[in-house]
């Protein structure tokens, strides 16, 4: 089993937001431009104060780069390879399959005696000439009967830093054991997924949790289907599969989203809710960490505790914002896209469906067919849903602590002209003093300001005319330099940061920092965390 020391887990936690991104290409003209309407919000007088830059910034950046390279060189080969390459991974190196079986001392006969379980992610479905086409995806696995003491030992060694499980409150001890047990499962590779039973869903969520959203109970669709092919070597399955109509409303004849319950036969777990999404309409694609829930992935100690031990907690009043969208934007499809590894996704889904509108789900699978998807998972998943629904409009929601978001969200607006309705990004550098890492706004340089907004508080998202593409609250100053902002060592520290309708705060920014320097700085910060902890 590969070594999973605490230090190697802390480092990716601090690095997940720091991969340098190339500037997005210039926008291509929209084939069907629509004249902008008058904004519904009365603009307040806001001064534009772009972040200051230093006259001789090249020498300063060269010094930062040289010092970073020196630190990395001194630390030597102990640095994990993904640091030098700049590949982010919050949960890096989870054990899988035979590694888990070996570490827990399970014989093949012990494993065979365990019941089969299925993590079935809530799928979306599109309508084609052949009917509804459902994206079934998830993981087949077996859950070893691991003792509480063994789970505590694993969590103390690998996932909990600065404390131990026994010192946590009872509810957090239970949460830690639950998450640790979800990681130490044995995936079932090259096996058939049992037949899936489908029927109309009266409610939403994998276990029937109530949820908002514009979805309605399907008018039919009851049937049993068998997925083609077997699971991957890592136990994953991902396949678009056509289903029979059996009374379902065609996707080109309705604007409503229809719900279907799906049950994987022969598994103790494996329920999900499928969302049949019409050809046209609005889809909200939302990240989860540090935008819908408090995670603090940029603070290793807090990030690990918030992910493994503490109850998932919504960020401020974001649930009321999403509830309002689900009511004021009829027939909106909600899709939750997280790059969290597959093994810990069930907790995310349970949190979402007890707190936010029900919707479909994407995560980071264990197995990919090509290296591009592995290294750019968010872009891969975004491309897939955009290509699946070429006539739908999309609202993209996340925060600035994810470097892939800062690269991929504006890129979607240029790669898929006319499909990105709004981009909303919480500026975690401005809202959370624990986030001291830079973020790159260069991808937004050629986008229409009316289509995106950096914000501080959920209330900044109120009273927007999202349906008509008016996504910028003009009382919220942006002050973008279209380069790296939030740089260290006081560079540009007197500048006004992206503000909020409720006030503004100071931050550092810098215009035109190169992608190479950004990547080097990211590695430098990661190395500092690695050496300190």
Image (spheres, rainbow, N blue to C red):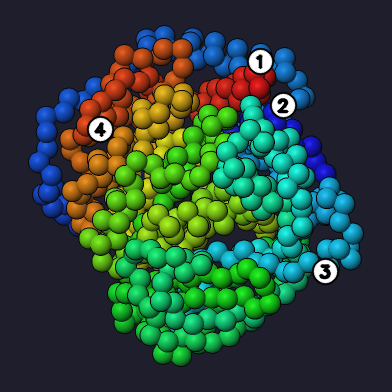
Q: Secondary structure at mark 1?
A: helix
Query: What is the x, y in percent for residue 447?
Result: 31, 42
Q: Which mark, by number, is residue 470?
A: none
Sequence-wise, which precedes: disc 1 or disc 2? 1
**What is the quadrant of the N terminus in the image?**
top right
410 sits left or right of 194 in the view:
left
Camera-near label (4 vs 2) is 4
Q: Position of residue 472 (x, y in %)?
A: 23, 43
Contact (Cβ within 8 Å) of mark 1 with mark 4: no
Q: Nearer the viewer, residue 406 or 272?
A: 272
Mark nearest the camera among 3 and 1 is 3
| Label 1 vs 4, first from the N-terminus | 1
Q: Which SS class for mark 2?
A: loop
Disc 3 marks which residue?
113
Q: Nearer the viewer, mark 2 or mark 3?
A: 3
Q: Earlier in the sequence, mark 4 or mark 3?
A: 3
Is disc 4 in contact with disc 3, using a CB cutoff of under 8 Å?
A: no
Tell me which numbered mark, 3 or 1, is placed earlier along the sequence.
1
**Residue position marked by numbered label 4 in the rendering:** 500
Tally of marks: 4
């Amino acid at each position: 089993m590969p070594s999973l020391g605490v230090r190697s887990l802390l480092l990716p936690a601090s690095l997940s937001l720091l991969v340098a991104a190339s500037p997005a290409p210039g926008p291509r003209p929209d084939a069907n431009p629509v004249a902008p309407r008058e904004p519904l919000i009365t603009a307040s007088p806001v001064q534009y104060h772009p972040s200051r830059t230093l006259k001789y910034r090249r020498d300063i950046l060269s010094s930062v780069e040289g010092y970073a390279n020196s630190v990395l060189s001194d630390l030597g080969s102990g640095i994990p390879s993904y640091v030098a390459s700049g590949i982010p991974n919050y949960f890096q190196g989870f054990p899988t399959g035979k590694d888990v079986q070996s570490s827990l001392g399970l014989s093949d006969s012990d494993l065979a005696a365990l019941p089969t379980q299925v993590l079935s992610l809530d799928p979306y479905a599109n309508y084609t000439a052949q009917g509804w086409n459902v994206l079934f995806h998830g993981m087949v696995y077996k859950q070893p009967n691991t003792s509480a003491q063994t789970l505590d030992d694993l969590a103390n060694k690998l996932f909990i830093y600065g404390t131990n499980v026994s010192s946590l409150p009872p509810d957090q001890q239970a949460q830690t054991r639950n998450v640790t047990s979800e990681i130490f499962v044995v995936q079932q590779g090259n096996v058939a997924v049992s037949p899936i039973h489908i029927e109309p869903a009266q409610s939403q969520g994998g276990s029937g949790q109530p949820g908002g959203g514009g979805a309605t109970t399907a008018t039919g669709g009851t049937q049993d289907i068998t997925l083609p092919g077997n699971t991957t070597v890592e136990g994953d399955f991902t396949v678009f599969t056509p289903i029979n109509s059996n009374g379902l409303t065609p996707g080109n004849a309705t604007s409503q989203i229809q719900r279907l319950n799906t049950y994987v036969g022969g598994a103790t777990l494996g329920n999900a809710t499928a969302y049949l999404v019409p050809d046209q309409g609005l889809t909200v694609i939302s990240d989860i960490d540090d935008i819908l829930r408090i995670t603090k992935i940029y603070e290793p100690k807090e990030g690990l505790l918030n992910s493994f031990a503490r109850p998932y907690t919504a960020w401020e009043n974001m649930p009321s914002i999403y509830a309002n969208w689900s009511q004021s934007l009829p027939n909106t499809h909600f899709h939750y896209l997280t790059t969290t590894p597959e093994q810990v996704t069930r907790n995310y889904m349970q949190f979402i469906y007890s707190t936010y509108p029900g919707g479909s789900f994407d995560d980071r699978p264990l197995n990919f067919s090509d290296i591009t998807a592995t290294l750019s998972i968010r872009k891969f998943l975004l491309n897939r849903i955009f290509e699946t629904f070429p006539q739908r409009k999309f609202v993209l929601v996340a925060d600035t602590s994810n470097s892939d978001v800062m690269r991929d969200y504006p890129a979607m607006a240029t790669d898929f002209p006319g499909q990105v309705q709004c981009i909303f990004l919480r500026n975690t550098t401005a809202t959370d003093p624990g986030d001291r890492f830079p973020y790159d706004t260069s991808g937004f340089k050629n986008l229409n300001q009316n289509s995106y907004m950096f914000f501080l508080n959920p209330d900044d998202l109120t009273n927007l005319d999202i349906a008509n593409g008016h996504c910028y609250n003009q009382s919220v100053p942006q002050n973008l330099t279209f380069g790296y902002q939030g740089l260290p060592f006081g560079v540009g520290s007197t500048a006004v940061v992206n503000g909020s309708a409720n006030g503004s705060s100071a931050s550092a920014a810098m215009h035109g920092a190169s992608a190479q320097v950004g990547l080097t700085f990211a590695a430098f910060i990661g190395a500092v965390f690695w050496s300190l902890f």
